Image (cartoon, coloured by chain):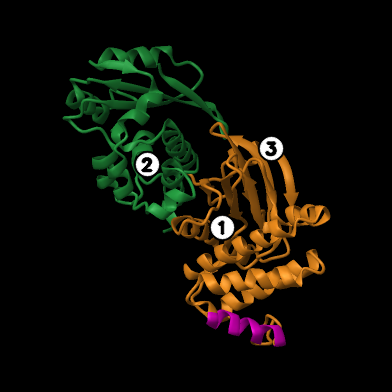
Amino acid sequence: MAQEKSMAIPEFLSKAELLKQGAEARVYRAEFLGKPTIVKERFPKRYRHPVLDEKLTHRRTVQEVRSILRCRRAGISAPVVYFVDYTSHCIFLEEIVGSSTVRDHIASTRQSDCSNELAWLAERVGQILAKMHEEDVVHGDLTTSNMLLRHQEDGESELFLIDFGLSYISALPEDKGVDLYVLEKAFLSTHPNTETLFERLLKSYAAASKKSSAVIKKLDEVRLRGRKRSMVG
Amino acid sequence: MHVTHELELFPDHRVTQMLFKEVKNAAELRQCAVEGKIKGALINPTMLVNPFQVLVAANKAVNLQKIGKMKTRSLYSEIIFNLSPTNNISEAFKRFGSSDGDDSVLVVLVHDKDEPQLLSDITARVSGRQVPAEDVSSLTDHAKIKKLYKITPQEEKCGTLLDAVVCRMASKDIL
């Protein structure tokens, strides 16, 4: 049988609701096998050589699925993967219905001035990231927009990590330190004057993991020099 | 009794699931499927958590068939293969396919809009009692599934058994 690109997925996506378009991928909402689903489509980048583009896109798709699985196995909430298509580079993920981003949550909670709740949240984020780094998953794009919060009926809320597109597996404290550094930069610029809150996050990160002291030490180094170690690229 | 779902990606394809208990002719049915007289997949329902699991397997099978990348010889064997967490075809058939001594079976059919003929053909062949396909959850062998898919207690904290199973099915070709 001739190997050809199926038109089924492009046709399906043309009827789906486009939620966001970034530099890397488009994110759609649709119903898939009867469930509310998020589809992440890594479209071809015309500015790259086709062979290189295919390779990079394929690797990122694979990496994203692997990291989600690894996190879930360790008990870290991340969306369920329903289906992956490696020809159109689409990942079909569970939609976390009724959730909001940690970013929005912090912004709205700060207006209503509930510092206790935010402190709780910062600690929770610190614990989850410590757990993720214990599994040697480096997220690569930690921001408060890539964390979702879903409030449950029992008053508890569940924290999900999303967007593992730039993630990779590494045991190096250096890589984990850079991961936290990226979050620190993003956190403090999206939420001004939250230095004490972020400190709380780091403290709970440090308390939650045995491997954390080496990472925090690296974080201090990275702060002095920036995230690029080799000064190349 | 049966459940039929449309595959949103392939709108001219429907997946129908029929569950039978107290089946007396499992060996004969399996032979028919092997010979191609039954155009469907015969699945051991104790390895299923929920009909959604079968939908995920069927959707993947149809997609791979369209792009010519199936790992097994037919759409129906591919559905059984897709349920398994490993890439070992004979083991997938052994664990997830129907065995000769089974007293229950889930029949999966992939068809276009018209189906009544197909369904009555299956019910005529199976000597057993048809029950609602959703009842598959009452036959689930949880311990066996957890062992086979290597599901840890911590993973069950962040989702259901079905979530864990579906994730493994969707990602098995890159592990």
Q: Using the image as rendered, state which of residue A176 and residue B105 is in the foreground.
A: A176
Q: CA distance from mark 2 to mark 1?
A: 21 Å
Residue name at image x 64 percent, y 41 percent: A10
Amino acid found under the numbered disc labelled 1: Thr
Residues flagged by tags 2 and 1 on a common chain = no
Q: Report which quarter residue B40 is drawn in.
A: top left
Q: In the rendered image, which residue does mark 3 sit on?
A: A16
Element at label 1:
helix
Residue name at image x 43 percent, y 47 percent: B164
Element at label 2:
helix
The chain displayed green equals B
Badge 2, how many Cα within 10 Å: few under 14, some, many 20+? Answer: many
Badge 3, how many Cα within 10 Å: few under 14, some, many 20+? Answer: some
- Give the image location of residue B72, x and y in percent: 34, 43
Vertical side of B149 occupied by B2: above or below: above
Element at label 3:
loop
Residue A45 seen in this snapshot = no
Vertical side of A111 occupied by B62: above or below: above
Q: Which residues are magenta?
A: A213-224
Badge 1, how many Cα within 10 Å: few under 14, some, many 20+? Answer: many
Q: In the rendered image, which residue does mark 2 sit on?
A: B83
Residue A224 seen in this snapshot = yes
Amino acid found under the numbered disc labelled 3: Ala
Residue A173 is labelled as none
Which image quarter holds the C terminus of chain A? bottom right
Residue A61 is labelled as 1
The chain displayed orange equals A
Q: In the picture provided, is B30 more to the left or to the right than A55?
A: left
